[in-house]
Amino acid sequence: MKRLRTLFFAFIVPFITLGAGLIEAAPKEKIIEFSDALGSAVLYTPRGKKADTGVIVVHEWWGLNDYARNRARQLANEGYAAIAVDMYGHGKVATHPKDATAFMNAALAEPEKMNARFNAAKAELEKLKKVDRIFAIGYCFGGAVVLNQARMGNDLAGVASFHGSLGTQTPAQEGKVKAKVLVATGGADPMVPAKQVGDFVTEMGEAGVNLQLLSFPGVLHSFTNPDATAKGKETGLPVAYDEAADKQSWSALMRFLKE
């Protein structure tokens, strides 16, 4: 009898494992190569269904690292087509603030190329047959990127910025912004101070933008990144992960994408 139970268990466990694998199948991953000047992106699509909504994911100032890819993969697991675009162009990933600053400044010095990279990623989502709405989300540097795409009037359903800079030299103009906007920011983030947040709210109000703003009291910069606390200790940067703010802002994003 004991041997019979053992054989039964040995038979049924692989079946359950296979079933779980089917339910939680990893999304499809595809490297997208743009022109030599623009670089590449990584496209994630859900298995077993065709997504009707696409999301462009723009990385932190560290570059297109595992964190940004994981966020795109997470979106695909939620049923969205997600493309993580390399705004630095050719796989530049920093681990030290000095390098991250250099990479970011080099990208910002070529706004036309940044726009071309963003729109190349958008075009990849537009190629997918069922996708009829495209959003863009960004973290830190990426948050500023997607907000500026909205300010420029890029045809997007919405943009979401997580601990991104909110300041700009080219404020949104009334009637130009097509996207609705979601912003999640840390109330104790010295990189996005209260005045900048207030000025941004005024800017969006004057431009007639549909804005949702989440401000988390006592929360520092980079609060969605689980590696931020260790990075802050290593570099002296005022960054730290906050699990509650991370989960609440992600839930807000899920609602934002479905509205």
Image (spheres, helix red, strand yellow):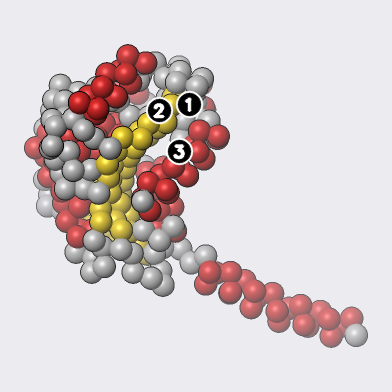
Seen from the viewer's position, the closer of residues 17 and 209 is 209
Q: How many residues crowd mark 2 within 10 Å: few (<14), some (14–19), many (20+)?
A: many
Question: Hey, which quadrant is residue 10 in on the image?
Answer: bottom right
Seen from the viewer's position, the closer of residues 134 and 84 is 134
Q: Is residue 92 visible?
A: no
Seen from the viewer's position, the closer of residues 181 and 14 is 181
Q: Residue at x 30, y 63 (%)?
A: 52
Relative horizontal placement of residue 196, taking residue 79 as reference (left or right): left
Mark 1 or mark 2, earlier in chain: 2
Relative horizontal placement of residue 133, taking residue 70 as reference (left or right): left
User: Which residue, given by chain and number where applicable, does mark 3 sit on?
Assistant: 249
* Mark 2 residue element: strand
Q: Is residue 110 visible?
A: yes
Q: Are circles 1 and 2 on residues that touch, CB within 8 Å? A: yes
Labels in figure, total: 3
> Please, which residue is most extreme toward the right here?
1
Q: CA distance from mark 1 to mark 2?
A: 6 Å
Residue 185 - label: 2
Q: Residue at x 39, y 58 (%)?
A: 76
At which x and y percent is residue 228?
47, 30
At which x and y percent is residue 216?
48, 26
Identity, as a three-letter code, of the amino acid under mark 1: Phe
Judge whether 23 appears above or below 123 on screen.
below
Judge whether 135 appears above or below 143 on screen.
below
User: Which residue, given by chain and number where applicable, does mark 1 sit on?
Assistant: 216
Q: Are circles 1 and 3 on residues that touch, CB within 8 Å? A: yes
Mark 2 or mark 3, earlier in chain: 2
Q: How many residues crowd mark 3 within 10 Å: few (<14), some (14–19), many (20+)?
A: many
At which x and y percent is residue 257?
36, 50
At which x and y percent is residue 178?
18, 43
Relative horizontal placement of residue 109, taking residue 81 as reference (left or right): left
Question: Hey, which quadrant is residue 90 in on the image?
Answer: top left
